[in-house]
């Protein structure tokens, strides 16, 4: 096992760095998109609620592999959509960015539902108080409801981020050079399946365990007393 780590240490670091970047970029965009969809789901406008509900139900029940492969084959290869300038590494750059889009779109549905559960914990009287002060729906959501909702769902959002870290391995389906793709390459070249599996399992534990502990600490630090 240690010989494998020594032989592949630079590739392992590069692969897990790509996994980290996929997680961070996708988590950022998923948080923004998920917040917008959550706002639509609690909107007083019926068509906005319908679109939000449709988005969550469709995306949450669609396999992530299908979404990422559609982004690469459907948007990139078939429709010719480009997210990176032409160059020697344009294919890998495009695939990396389409993987971020696929992961963000998929994860946003789970962020939305976590956030909506947090919105439901905010007492109705506070929303009424905001409206009595003349706040619009957007102002009420931005200044009264969402700050409390985010504090209530720190731990669930941490779980979504951990799931996103593990889901980033699906990006290997379109050739993004993250951990799962290197694991497949090592399995082809080395006769040490168990050791290779242990190396990558350890790598993901190192990534996800501190994340869970950090979000658990944040949840206790900023929890809302009801």
Image: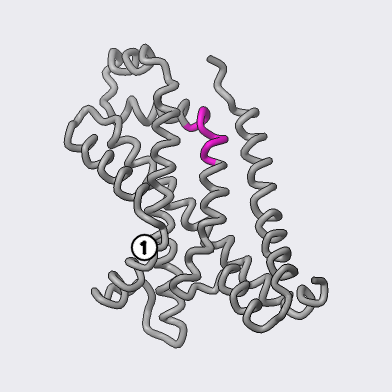
Give the colour scheme shown.
one colour
SS at circle 1: helix
Depth check: give the residue in front, 96 or 69: 69
Report the residue marked by disc 1: 66
Q: Position of residue 149 (x, y in %)?
A: 45, 28
Q: Residues within 10 Å of mark 1 (few under 14, many from 20)?
A: few
**Is residue 100 toward the left or the right of residue 23 in the image?**
left
In the image, residue 75 sits, relative to residue 150, either above or below, namely: below
Q: Position of residue 17 (x, y in %)?
A: 62, 66
The magenta span reads 150-157
**Is residue 12 toward the left or the right of residue 58 in the image?**
right
Which image quarter is the N terminus in?
bottom right
Q: Is residue 118 magenta?
A: no
Q: Residue furthest bottom?
A: 88
In the image, residue 99 sits, relative to residue 32, either above or below, namely: below
Residue 36 occupies quadrant = top left
In the image, residue 141 sits, relative to residue 212, either above or below, namely: above
Q: Residue at x 35, y 49 (%)?
A: 61
Q: Number of marks in the image?
A: 1
Dominant secondary structure (helix, strand or loop) of the stretch shown in magenta: helix
Q: Residue at x 45, y 36 (%)?
A: 114
Q: Residue at x 37, y 47 (%)?
A: 60
């Amino acid at each position: 096992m240690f010989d494998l780590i020594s032989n592949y240490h630079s590739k392992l670091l590069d692969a897990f760095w790509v996994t980290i970047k996929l997680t961070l970029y996708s988590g950022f965009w998923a948080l923004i998109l998920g917040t917008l969809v959550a706002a639509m789901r609690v909107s007083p406008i019926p068509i906005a609620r319908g679109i939000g509900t449709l988005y969550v139900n469709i995306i949450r029940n669609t396999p992530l592999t299908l979404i990422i492969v559609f982004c690469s084959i459907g948007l990139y290869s078939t429709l010719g959509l480009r997210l990176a300038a032409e160059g020697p590494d344009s294919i890998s750059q495009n695939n990396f960015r389409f993987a971020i889009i696929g992961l963000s779109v998929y994860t946003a549905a789970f962020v939305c539902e976590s956030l909506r559960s947090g919105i439901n914990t905010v007492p109705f009287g506070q929303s009424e108080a905001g409206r009595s002060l003349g706040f619009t729906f957007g102002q009420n959501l931005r200044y009264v409801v969402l700050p409390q909702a985010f504090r209530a769902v720190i731990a669930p959002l941490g779980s979504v981020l951990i799931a996103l870290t593990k889901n980033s391995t699906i990006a290997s389906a379109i050739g993004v050079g993250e951990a799962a793709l290197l694991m497949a390459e090592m399995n082809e070249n080395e006769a040490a399946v168990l050791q290779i599996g242990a190396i990558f399992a350890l790598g993901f534990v190192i990534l996800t365990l501190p994340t869970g502990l950090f979000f658990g600490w944040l949840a206790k630090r900023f929890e809302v007393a009801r």
